[in-house]
């Protein structure tokens, strides 16, 4: 009697005459995990990273609840993805090829997630983090709650409790962003660029953290990967790359004219 041949769980089918891999549901689901629903899951994850405890590089996609009254997000770490959105893990698994950890931050999945949540992708950023510092900022700063700068307008549109400081040629803003984390935004006037002021403002934010919250241990930054000048400024100011992140915000939350 001929020995039986074990069938692979992955089969090939044809669509419009072309071969396509069909992966059974059980195989698709193994790499997607879910936690018991709780509103503080994302905040807890961010606090763990602040304490130096990183997500395990296990090749998993973890689904957790999005913050209450907050933005949904897809966060990419080293060999670990977190989908912070009110969707079922089965729904996520059905739309991701097993083992492809780039897929959750690519347009097809993000578009499907936006349609499901009735949201839009606000940005796809590199995310960095730095610990707070106690001594004086490297540049003189003046609190300016009435600053009419576009950077301030944008920060207050997407963050809460934003506070503003200005210096000659630049501005720095600290406010509460995703899951209540403390985030920095800074900008250098065009005619002051190329002199190290961006690095100084990013560093100044680390000194300002405890003016916002005495018990805070650090500050987060989000920057477009293509904004090489700001990426360099953050790294020069001691920020460390954490991962990548796509924020999904309500459709109605757009800047005027945006």
Image (cartoon, rainbow, N blue to C red):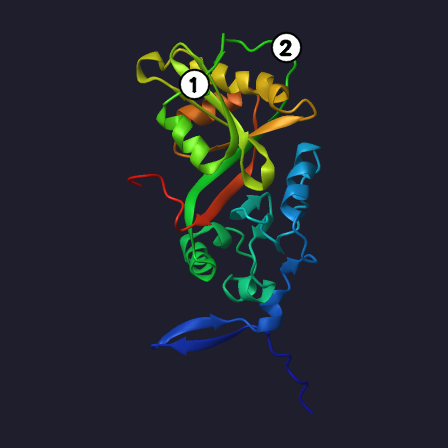
In the rendered image, the residue lying farthest to the front is 146
Q: Please state the horizontal and vertical placement of residue 204, each as a whole percent of the image.
A: 54, 16
Label 2 residue SS = loop
Quote the CA–CA distance across marks 1 and 2.
19 Å
Location of residue 63 by image quarter? bottom right
Question: Which is more N-terminal, label 2 or label 1?
Answer: 2
Q: Please state the horizontal and vertical placement of residue 226, each as a whole percent of the image.
A: 39, 34
Seen in the picture, residue 168 relative to 30 is either above or below; the reply is: above
In the rendered image, the residue lying farthest to the bottom is 1
What residue is shown with label 1?
171
Per the rendering, the mark at residue 225 is: none
Q: Where the N terminus falls, by quadrant?
A: bottom right
Label 1 residue SS = strand
Q: Please state the horizontal and vertical placement of residue 196, each as a whole percent of the image.
A: 43, 13
Q: Which of 250/125 is in front?
A: 250
Q: Which of 245/116 is in front?
A: 116
Rate crowding at label 2 as few (under 14), some (14 to 19) or many (20 or more) other CA atoms within 10 Å.
few
Per the rendering, the mark at residue 135 is: 2
């Amino acid at each position: 009697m001929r020995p039986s041949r074990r069938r692979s769980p992955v089969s090939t089918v044809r669509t419009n005459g072309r071969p396509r891999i069909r992966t059974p549901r059980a195989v698709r689901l193994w790499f997607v995990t879910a936690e018991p629903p709780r509103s503080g899951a994302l905040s807890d994850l961010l606090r763990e990273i602040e304490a130096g405890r990183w997500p395990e590089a296990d090749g998993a996609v973890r689904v957790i609840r999005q913050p209450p009254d907050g933005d949904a997000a897809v966060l990419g770490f080293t060999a670990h993805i977190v989908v912070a959105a009110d969707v079922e893990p089965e729904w996520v698994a059905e739309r991701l090829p097993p083992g492809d950890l780039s897929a959750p931050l690519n347009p097809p999945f993000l578009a499907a997630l936006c349609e499901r949540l009735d949201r839009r992708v606000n940005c796809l950023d590199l995310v960095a983090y730095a610990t707070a510092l106690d001594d004086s900022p490297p540049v003189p700063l003046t609190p300016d709650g009435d600053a009419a700068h576009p950077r301030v307008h944008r920060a207050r549109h997407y963050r809460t409790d934003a506070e503003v400081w200005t210096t000659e040629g630049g501005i720095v803003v600290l406010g509460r962003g995703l899951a209540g984390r403390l985030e920095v935004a800074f900008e250098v006037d065009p005619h002051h660029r190329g002199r190290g002021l961006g690095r100084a403002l990013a560093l100044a934010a680390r000194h300002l953290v405890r003016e916002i919250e005495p018990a805070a241990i650090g500050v987060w930054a989000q920057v477009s990967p293509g904004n090489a000048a700001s990426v360099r400024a953050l790294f020069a100011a001691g920020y460390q790359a954490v991962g990548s992140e796509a924020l999904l915000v309500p459709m109605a939350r757009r800047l005027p004219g945006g």
